[in-house]
Image (cartoon, helix red, strand yellow):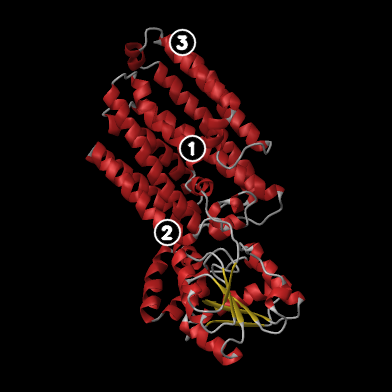
Amino acid sequence: MTQTAAAIGTDRPLVVDLDGTLIASDLLIEGLFAVIGSKPRMVLGAIGSLLKSKAELKHFVAEFAAFEVGSLPYDPSVLDLIENAKAAGRPIYLATASHEKYAQAVAAHLGVFDGVLATTRDHNLSGVNKAAALLERFGDHGFDYIGNHADDLAIWRHANAAYAIRTTSSVRRRLGKIGIDVHHVESAQASIKVWLRGLRVHQYSKNLLIFLPLMASHSLNAMQWLDAFLAFISFSLAASATYLLNDLIDIDADRRHATKRYRPLASGTLSLQAAIVAIPLLFGVALAIALAISPFYTAVLAGYVALTTSYSFYLKRRLLVDVVALALLYTIRVLAGGVATGTVISPWLLGVSLFTFTALALIKRYTEVATLLDRNLPDPSNRNYRKDDLVVLAALAAATGVNAVMVFALYLVSPAVTLMYAHPDMLWLLCPLLLYLLSRALMLSHRREMPDDPVVWAMRDRICRLGIVVAGAIVLLAI
C-alpha cells in the first residue's frame, strides 16, 4: 500500500532504488539488448567487460546505449510515495546499482532527488556495497529504503523502515524476519492477459498459412491435417519466442512509438527477466514438437527461427532488405505446411505468396512511416526509412500487389489447373477479388485507417473475411 507522509515521518531520508522499483524495468538488461541488437558483434565486448567486473559491464553498456528517460515505465505507487515524502519535507535520495549515467539522467528528469548514489566504472553499487554507502552517509537505521530484489535485503537490515515492491515470496519471508517495519507497496502483476499480449497470440492467425498447401491440394487425409495442426502449434510457439526477443531489442524505440509503447515489455507490465526465461522455454517446446513431425520440418522451422532472429538483430535496419525478409517469413509458413504434411507445393503458390506478402510488408512500412509524418516525429532510429520515402513505398506496394495477381493469372493458364479443377474458368473470378483486396489495403493505409500489421488486420477486417469466404466459394464451385 502507498503510505502517507504522516505514516513515514518527516525527518529521515527516503532512499529509492531504481531498477524494478522506481521503474518497472532493468536498465542493464535493456541496455545490453539495445547494444547487441544494434551491433551484434558487440557481444564480444560485453563478455570481455563482464569477465573484468560487473561494474565494467555496466560502464560498457552505458557507453553505447542511451535511453529516452522520459518514456521509462515509472511506477505510479513509488512516485506517490516520493511525492508524499517530499511534501512532508523529507530528503529523497536515489540509490541504484545502475550506471551513474542513467541514474543522473533519471534524477534530472524527475527533479525530486536531493542526491544520487550509483554504480561507477570502478564500483558496483549493489547489495552490500550499496548498504555500506548508505551506512556511511546516513548511519545504521538512519534512513527508509524502498527496493524490490533479494540483494536489497542487505540494505533493509540497516534501514529504519522497509518498503518493498515486486518482491518474490521468498524475499518477503526473509524481509519479515529482519525485525523492522515493513510496508509492501502495491504494483500491477503480469496477468494471463498480459502474457497473451506479450506472446502476441493474436498474431497466431498468420500461422494459418501452414494449412494453405493442404487446402490447395484438396487433401482430406486426417493424418496430414493432424501434422499441419502440430506444425501450427510449433510455429506459434517459436514465433512467440522471437516476438519477445524482438521486443527486448526494440524496447526503447517501442516506448517512443504511438501504439507500440503499450506492449507489455515496453510498458513494464511484463518483466524483462520473465521474458528472458520464457524465450528458451518456448523455443524448446517448439523444437520438441517439430522433431515429432519430421527432421525436414524441423529444418524448415530452424530456418524460420534463424531468419527471424537475423531480422531482429540486423535485417530490419537494412533498407528494403527488411521487406524481403518479412515476405520470406510469411512464405516460409506456406513451405512449412507442405513439408510437415508431405504435400507437394506448386511453384505458382510460392510465387503468389512471395509477391502478396511483399506487398503487405511494404504497406506495413508505409503505415509506420505515415504515422511518423502525421505526428511530426523524427525518422525512426531502428529502421532505415525516412518520412520522404512515403511515396516510393506506396508505389512499390502497388506494383508488387499487381504482380501477385499477374502471377496468379499465369497459373490459371497452366496445365496443372485443368487437371485439378472441373471448372477452371471459375478461378478467374479470384483475380479481380485479389486485386481489390490488395488495392483496398493500400488505400486504407494511405487514409491512415490501417493498423501496424496488415496481415493481422486482414484476418480481422470484415470485408477481408468476406473476401476469403467468397474466394472459398469460388474454389468449391471450380472443383
Q: Nearer the viewer, residue 433 or 255?
A: 255
Q: Can residue 314 be seen in this view?
A: no
Q: Which of 262 and 126 is in front in this view?
A: 126
What is the x, y in percent for residue 57?
44, 76
Disc 1 target residue: 358
Q: Which of 461 and 390 is in front in this view?
A: 461
Q: Is residue 207 visible?
A: yes
Residue at point 40% right, 73% down?
45
Which residue is the extreme one toward the top?
422
Question: Where on the picture, by quarter, is residue 349?
Answer: top left
Mark in the foreground, 3 or 2: 2
Disc 3 target residue: 426
Question: Where on the picture, by quarter, is residue 293?
Answer: top left
**CA neighbours of label 3 inside 10 A, class few (<14), some (14 to 19), many (20+):** some
Query: Compared to 338, does 118 lie above or below?
Result: below
What is the x, y in percent for residue 132?
51, 88
Q: Earlier in the sequence, mark 1 or mark 2?
A: 2
**Quarter of the image that includes the N terminus:** bottom right
Disc 2 target residue: 276
Q: How far apart are marks 3 and 2 (CA)?
A: 51 Å
Mark in the foreground, 1 or 2: 2
